[in-house]
Amino acid sequence: MVSKETVLQTLHCLPSQYPQMLSEKFPHIMEKIVKLWNSPDGEAYFADLLQPNGRGGGRFDRNGFPEKVWWEIYRMYELYKKPRPRSGKGIHR
């Protein structure tokens, strides 16, 4: 399980923005989000998580998230979309 401090540092968010319910109910998803945070693969993962389920399209292989968890994921996605400074690793001038 990824620590709260690691999540806050990775997401560069305030403690009030910490996705508490996601962390408690779906720690494997939280871990994967943190793992993919600085990766272009994060976009596809968020898109998959936020897909509507059931009627009207979307995924049929899961029941979906409780509303509060869905909103926590959505707020994390909003943070993910914000520009971040690049690490500069491997860049030589």
Image: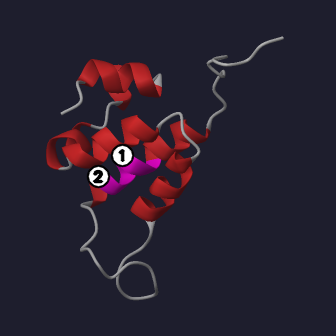
Q: Amino acid at mark 1?
A: Glu
Q: Which label number is shown at residue 39?
A: none
Reply above or below: 7 against 29: above
Pointer 2 residue: 69
Closer to the camera in the image, 3 or 76:
3
Residue shown at 44%/79% (left/top)? 58
> Is residue 72 shown in magenta?
yes
Seen at 35% across and 56% down, the residue is 70
Q: Where is residue 63? Give x, y as percent.
A: 24, 74
Q: Position of residue 91 (x, y in %)?
A: 73, 17
Residue 25 higher or lower than 90, as above or below: below
Is disc 2 placed on a helix, strand or loop? helix
The span picked out in magenta is 69-74
Q: Residue furthest right?
A: 93
Q: In the rendered structure, which amino acid carries the disc numbered 2? A: Val
Q: Residues within 10 Å of mark 2 (few under 14, many from 20)?
A: some
